[in-house]
Image (spheres, helix red, strand yellow):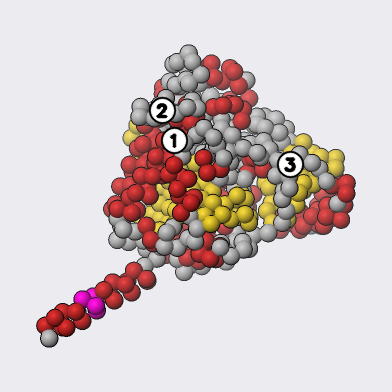
Amino acid sequence: MKKIFLSIIIFQISFVQLLSQEKQNPNFIIIFCDDLGYGDLGVYGNPIIKTPNLDKMAFEGQKWTQFYVADPVCTPSRAALLTGRYPIRSGMTSSKLPVLFPFSSKGLKSEEITIAEILKKKKYKTAMVGKWHLGHLPEFLPMNQGFDSYYGIPYSNDMDSKNQSPQHFRQFSEAESMQVYFQKTRSDDNYEPKISTFQVPLMQNKKVIERPANQKNITKRYTEKAVDFINKNNNKPFFLYLAHSMPHIPLYASDEFFGSSDGGLYSDVIQEIDWSVGEILNALKKNNISENTIVLFTSDNGPWLRFKKHGGSAGPLRAGKGTTFEGGQRVPTIFWGPGIVKPGIVNDMGSTLDIINTFSKLADLEIPNDRKMDGYDLSNVLMSLDSSPRKEFYYWGFAELHAYRYKNLKLHIKQREPVNYGRPTIKLDNPELYDLSTDFSEKYDISSSNQQSVTSMLKSIEKHLIDVEGSTPDQLTGRIKNYGN
């Protein structure tokens, strides 16, 4: 009888624990790289850079081949990720200065609602580690946007440099930047920049704790903070946003990884990021919470091709950072979650705009209904490999609409070639149409033989601009017709 009674008690305890686990909301982790290209990972075809942790993550989870960021540069891309809104709606984009600088007085407005703020409704613990770049002044820092804590550099790691001005990206050629702006301490191609060249601050919550930040070990320190957060919150739902400063120029790798790869410093940096991913996943497994956690790995935009082999690769895609070609906004993306995400390769469209909808759905929360939202719920794709609800995407850059994709067709009305911020936008005399199902390198314009599709897509662009800008159809007619201002 005692054995039977004991068995009943053990069963009851196990059943209660099971119910508790089923009711617990999933944990969410976003690992966001800076300027990582579509062709920079082994699982996306890179033959030199070794990324075993990311390759395994893709094998165990979902590799997305057509996943987009909402803008091809840092600040607006990050705003869109956290809010689920094209940055033109939140004001986090500009035709003059496309990203925020240390002299900027603006940031993400308090009225905008972030993923962290939504998850706080269910008492999620939230942490931001890494590059913020949505305003460095106190009122714009992560702790005013739903995050319980912050550790990182508040803007790009090349800022606060010597003799920096609003025009600093236009001052130097690629060769001059390597020799002068980045002040090499080594004479070979595997250069190591001086840390003192960039007076970027390292912050803990709202306080500067180190200046200049020692960027040689910044990836390692970000990783340690992220793992510590996971360890301390293994019994409650959490949201961790880990935004690496790398592989944005200037490149730094810790002593353990500097010179360790076959492809130079850029490869060293990516392989250290891969190590970091492995540490994150191992921490989840050690804490027995991997089955209830979703990890998203992606990038804020394409590679900074201006710096050639120090700037990464977009693989077979055209162009890179700063452009609305595929290489600028289609990014490597992996979802991992052994107890939630069904493994497979997803060839449908998705976007960082969709993350707020997806995480909210999985946490049984509502997205804001008092403003225009631009995302879709991808939860059924993650859990069941259903078709993605996203069938279209608008390519915004520098506060201008450049292109529109519907299913496999992409229509360009404006273009900007890589990758100098000072290079003006080209207003096309005639729109260019590409079939991305057979021409993802955007080499062959098929507009002349598909005028009906061009006309239909221009009408969709017109409706979108009315929705975004509040313009009247009469005001937009000339703009669309002339592909102008």
Q: Which mark is residue 271?
A: 1
Q: Amino acid at mark 3?
A: Glu
Quarter location, residue 200: top left
- Assign a secondary structure to mark 2: loop
Q: Residues within 10 Å of mark 1 (few under 14, many from 20)?
A: many
Please tell me how crowded label 3 is: few (under 14), some (14-19), or many (20+) other residues with Cα within 10 Å. Answer: many
Image point 45% across, 25% down: which residue? Answer: 198
Q: Name the residue that disc number 3 marks.
A: 442
Mark-to-mark CA distance, 2 and 1: 9 Å
Q: Position of residue 158 (x, y in %)?
A: 50, 29
Segment tinted magenta in the rendering: 9-13
* Residue 291 marker: none
Is disc 2 surrounded by few (<14), some (14 to 19) or many (20+) residues within 10 Å? some
In percent of width and height, residue 318 lies at 68, 38
Residue 415, magenta (yes or no): no
* Residue 375 spot, x, y in % from top left: 60, 59
Residue designated by label 2: 260
Tell me residue 380's x, y (percent): 55, 66
